[in-house]
Amino acid sequence: MEGIKWDEKGLVPVVVQDEKTKDVLMVAYMNNESFELTLKTGKAHYFSRSRQKLWLKGESSGHTQEVKSVRIDCDNDTILITVDQKVAACHTGYWSCFYRIWENGWNISGTKVFDEEKVYSDKDNK
Amino acid sequence: MEGIKWDEKGLVPVVVQDEKTKDVLMVAYMNNESFELTLKTGKAHYFSRSRQKLWLKGESSGHTQEVKSVRIDCDNDTILITVDQKVAACHTGYWSCFYRIWENGWNISGTKVFDEEKVYSDKDNK
């Protein structure tokens, strides 16, 4: 995709921000394929570094991200997308993956939205 | 620093968000030293991957970032800080480094705040 500077693994970090609240929800990685699929479908797709595969956000949980805007930084090596986040972004059940804050140690400051065991149990445990 | 999962280069990506506007300003990288200096001084310090050295944000321009909060993500491998950004974050003169938006190509959507040639000329060109 024109202009993006992919890293040595063919990836680019993507900051995901909720369109309405402006909360930063997560950071994930895209390769060229996931970037093009995101533009084409309007739903955020990433490349999972741990599973080494293309990943439609919400494919298990239903917590998809409808993409509202796509921006690139001055160095062409980082993407920022704003999204309409369904339910919550984090697989732990929190609205944002950044649910812990530093106060002489990490303390939970975020909002838990769903019970991750119920949402993922059908696929992962049964 | 406890709990942070540094990458193979000893770095962690840091999303920088303006405390007041909630705009995402930039993404930079910290190593352990810059993370500790950031906590100790309250001013954002990074590790420059291109220059391979510690970097106090604003050391040339005066456009420092006073740190208001520090958060970590669910995977312990990404940091989010909120800051009080002086003047502008981007060395190009834009408020945010994410000043271009995708609309069948990258188009400028951001706000230019200062003239980068005037701000940097004393140090870089003379």
Image (tube, coloured by chain):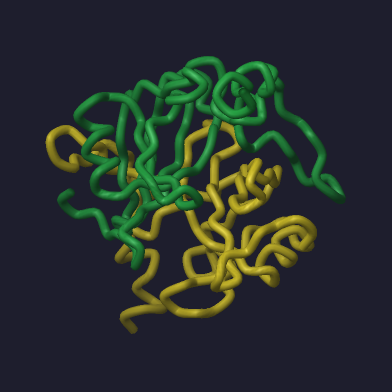
Chain colours: A green, B yellow
User: x, y (%) of residue B86?
Assistant: 54, 50
B28 up-or-down from B18: above or below: below
Q: Is residue B28 left or right of residue A71?
A: right
Q: Would residue B36 be visible to someone looking at this image?
A: yes
Q: Residue furthest left?
A: B104
The image quarter containing residue A120 is top right
A72 up-or-down from B22: above or below: below
Residue at image position (15%, 51%) is A2
In the picture, the quarter occupied by the C terminus of chain A is top right
Q: Is residue B55 left or right of residue A72?
A: right
Q: Residue furthest right?
A: A104
Foreground of the two, A14 or B117: A14
Residue at image position (76%, 55%) is B3
Q: Residue furthest front?
A: A126
Number of numbered labels in the structure image: 0
A93 up-or-down from A3: above or below: above
Residue at image position (66%, 24%) is A93
Foreground of the two, B61 or A25: A25
Residue at image position (47%, 40%) is B24
User: x, y (%) of residue B31?
Assistant: 63, 68
User: x, y (%) of residue B118?
Assistant: 33, 65
Q: Would residue B114 be visible to someone looking at this image?
A: no
User: x, y (%) of residue A102?
Assistant: 78, 46
The image quarter containing residue B90 is bottom left
Q: Residue furthest bottom?
A: B126
A44 up-or-down from B89: above or below: above
